[in-house]
Image: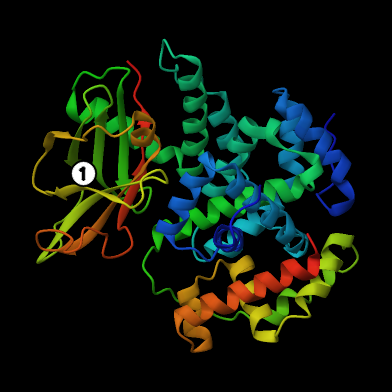
């Protein structure tokens, strides 16, 4: 009999953390269940960054790394899905920077940063951490907030942001650093 | 101890994802040796991770799980024998780093050494593929730690017109990137000297190639971001 586990959401945190602990002990069934529960999410995270490329290679590398490094997961630092998604994100960023290491990069078409705030499907399940982070992001100047979201969700480089906002790269760097500094202050950690 | 304000900003930029390939490679190398920088990056990843809650899932290809399972079922390559404790820990870190920079690079590196050259290898040899993408290796770098010698073999590099390729060793313990000289694209350069650099520095360094004016960097510093780079991995017997 095959039991299909639920898809990952913030309410599954204990379930996913338990799976990760089993994966750290080389439990293949747990690994398979973890894959079924999280692969769509990780693929979504990676696909937004690689955009026109294929994210499956990145998702593959991510799960191989999860298999080998599950023991490194520290529940006190955040949720299991955040740990896994961060691995996928870093792999995706390494990949797009390698493929397009030059300074000029097209900004993806059709991206409205405001979209990142409005996802009706996700509105029912938002963690306290998300609500807190969003309230801090809303305190930033709109342009700085947009830049941070474009960088985070889409892997925009400083150069791409400079093109989009018609400002020198050095200015973008300063704005980003200030925005991140304000964010840290607001989060108080 | 916490990271310096500059490293704190760098950690934030790394976690946000705005660094270019060269900067990312340097930060990735540094965080393995600098716990404060590593902690700052982890903290920033944690601060920003709630943003991922909203990302909608996309079902991956149906055969992806089989591909992953095949990868984790393959027996691991046998480790370099006779490793002392610290070296064993170092190997574990290399494996982790290799995972980060792509198993393709590792496979290419081994293929270059074992298949293309037929040269005998020892436990003291290390190899790096210098590349800008996993499918575009430019140079293969082989280092013999005991002899402090290195060999550079062009794989698919084409000479930049009117310019020179220069190889650099980048490591936090070195005050600045150290030039290892110019690279040919038309033949192997063997047994070049590394000098008396500390073995740990040699092994942990990022090796990067920049495009310089003909004859090399005029001021002893890289003139721009690396066009190819890589890190050493050990070559088993």
Query: For the view shown, which residue lies furthest in the bottom direction?
Result: A166
Relative horizontal placement of residue B174, taking residue B117 as reference (left or right): right
Question: Crowdedness of circle 1 by 10 Å Cα count: few (<14), some, many (20+)?
Answer: many
Where in the figure is residue A25, as x and y percent of width and height? Answer: 72, 22
Whether residue A122 is visible, yes or no, is: no
> Which is more toward the observer, B42 or A70?
B42
> Which is more toward the observer, A75 or A51?
A75
Where in the figure is residue B201, as x and y percent of width and height? Answer: 37, 36
Q: Is residue A22 above or below residue A170?
A: above
> Which is more toward the observer, B70 or B229?
B229
> Which is more toward the observer, B105 or B89?
B89
Query: For the view shown, which residue lies furthest in the front direction?
Result: B1
In terms of image quadrants, where is residue A181? bottom right
Q: Which residue is mark 1?
A: B155
Label 1 residue SS:
loop
Chain of residue at mark 1: B
Relative horizontal placement of residue A88, taking residue B85 as reference (left or right): right
Whether residue A43 is visible, yes or no, is: yes
Residue drawn 85% across the image and 35% down it:
A3
Image mark count: 1
Relative horizontal placement of residue B178, taking residue A31 as reference (left or right): left
Relative horizontal placement of residue A138, taking residue A101 as reference (left or right): right
Where in the figure is residue B204, as x and y percent of width and height? Answer: 40, 37
Q: Is residue B89 above or below residue B7?
A: above
Query: For the view shown, which residue lies furthest in the top direction?
Result: B82
Q: Quadrant of the C terminus of chain A?
A: bottom right
Q: Is residue B206 above or below residue B227?
A: above
Where in the figure is residue B64, as x and y percent of width and height? Answer: 59, 42
In terms of image quadrants, where is residue B70? top right
Q: How is the image coloured?
A: rainbow
């Amino acid at each position: 009999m095959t039991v299909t586990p639920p898809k990952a959401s913030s309410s599954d945190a204990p379930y996913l953390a338990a799976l990760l602990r089993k994966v750290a002990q080389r439990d293949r069934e747990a690994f398979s269940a973890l894959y079924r529960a999280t692969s769509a999410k990780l693929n979504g995270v990676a696909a937004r960054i690689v955009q026109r490329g294929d994210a499956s290679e990145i998702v593959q590398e991510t799960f191989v790394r999860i298999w080998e490094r599950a023991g490194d997961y520290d529940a006190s630092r955040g949720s299991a899905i955040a740990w896994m998604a961060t691995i996928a994100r870093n792999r995706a960023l390494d990949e797009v920077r390698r493929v397009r290491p030059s300074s000029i990069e097209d900004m993806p078409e059709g991206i409205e940063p405001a979209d990142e705030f409005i996802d009706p499907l996700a509105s029912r399940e938002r963690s306290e951490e998300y609500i807190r982070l969003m309230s801090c992001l809303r305190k930033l100047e709109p342009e700085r907030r947009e830049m941070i979201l474009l960088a985070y969700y889409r892997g925009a480089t400083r150069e791409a942001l400079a093109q989009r906002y018609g400002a020198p790269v050095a200015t973008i760097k300063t704005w980003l650093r200030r925005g991140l500094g304000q964010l840290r202050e607001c989060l108080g950690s | 101890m916490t990271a310096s304000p500059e490293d704190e900003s760098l950690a934030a930029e790394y976690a946000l994802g705005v660094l270019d390939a060269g900067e990312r490679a340097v930060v990735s190398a540094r965080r393995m040796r600098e716990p404060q920088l590593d902690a700052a990056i982890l903290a920033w990843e944690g601060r920003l991770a709630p943003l991922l809650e909203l990302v909608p899932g996309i079902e991956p290809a149906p055969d992806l799980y089989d591909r992953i399972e095949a990868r984790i079922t393959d027996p691991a390559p046998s480790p370099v024998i006779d490793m002392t404790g610290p070296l064993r820990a170092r190997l574990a870190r290399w494996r982790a780093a290799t995972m980060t920079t792509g198993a393709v690079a590792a496979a290419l590196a081994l293929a270059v050494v074992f298949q293309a050259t037929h040269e005998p290898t020892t436990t003291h040899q290390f190899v790096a593929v210098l590349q800008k993408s996993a499918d575009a290796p430019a140079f293969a770098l082989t280092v013999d730690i005991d002899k402090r010698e290195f060999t550079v073999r062009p794989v698919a590099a084409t000479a930049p017109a009117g310019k020179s390729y220069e190889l650099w060793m980048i490591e936090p313990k070195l005050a600045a990137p150290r030039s290892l000289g110019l690279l040919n694209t038309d033949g192997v350069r063997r047994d070049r000297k590394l000098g008396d650099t500390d073995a740990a520095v040699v092994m942990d360094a990022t090796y990067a190639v920049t495009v310089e004016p003909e004859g090399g960097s005029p001021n002893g510093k890289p003139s721009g971001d690396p066009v190819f780079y890589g890190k050493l991995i050990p070559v088993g017997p």
